[in-house]
Image (cartoon, rainbow, N blue to C red):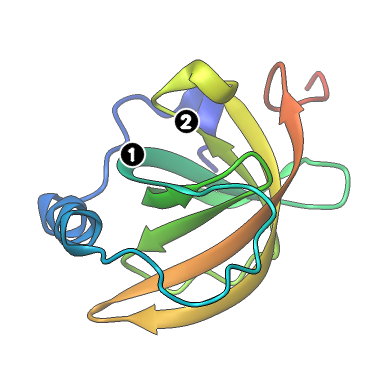
Amino acid sequence: MATIASTLSFLPSPALLAFVQRQVAQQQPFAGKERRDLPRLLLAMPVTVQGVDEQIAPVGDPHPMVVRDYSSRGLGLVHEHPFDYSRIVVELTYPEEGKILAAEVRWRKALGPFYHLGCEIVARLDRFPVHDE
């Protein structure tokens, strides 16, 4: 089983990255009443996502995804293949907010030919896996 720690250059497909970049570029400002307390940044950041268990131990193989939106409490991830894990670790490629985030998947939906996850950030990790193997 591969993990984030053992995966180098694990990038999303050019089609996925271009799709998210188009979405971000064409996004219209929200005109309704905002439910979020914190502003959300729209971007297209390639990331590696690893499913984890309750102890933040890796489960399954890592998946390339793209962050579509980000706030200090959550992020939206777009990906190519079904992804059934509810707990994840995300390795960011832009480490300004911390390099590794632990998150809980709050919702899933189809997004054109791809899939979209809405996630709540629950921790910022110094390393992953968190336990010595």
| Amino acid type, label 1 | Met
Q: Is residue 63 visible?
A: no
Task: Identify the mark at residue 105; answer none if there is no mark.
Answer: none
Pick the quarter of the image with the N terminus: top right
Binning the other alpha carbons within 10 Å of mark 1 as few (below 14), some (14 to 19) or many (20 upward) gives some
User: Can you identify the residue that label 2 sits on?
Assistant: 92
Q: Are marks 2 and 1 in contact (CB under 8 Å)?
A: yes
* Distance (Cα) linking label 2 and label 1: 8 Å
Q: Earlier in the sequence, mark 2 or mark 1?
A: 1
From the viewer's perspective, tell me whether residue 34 is left or right of residue 112.
Answer: right
**Residue 28: image location, x then y, percent:** 26, 66
From the viewer's perspective, tell me whether residue 115 is left or right of residue 54.
Answer: left
Pick the quarter of the image with the C terminus: top right
Figure check: 47 above or below 124: below
User: Can you identify the residue that label 1 sits on?
Assistant: 45
Local SS, label 2: loop
| Amino acid type, label 2 | Leu
Residue 44 position by quadrant = top left
Residue lying furthest right in this view? 55
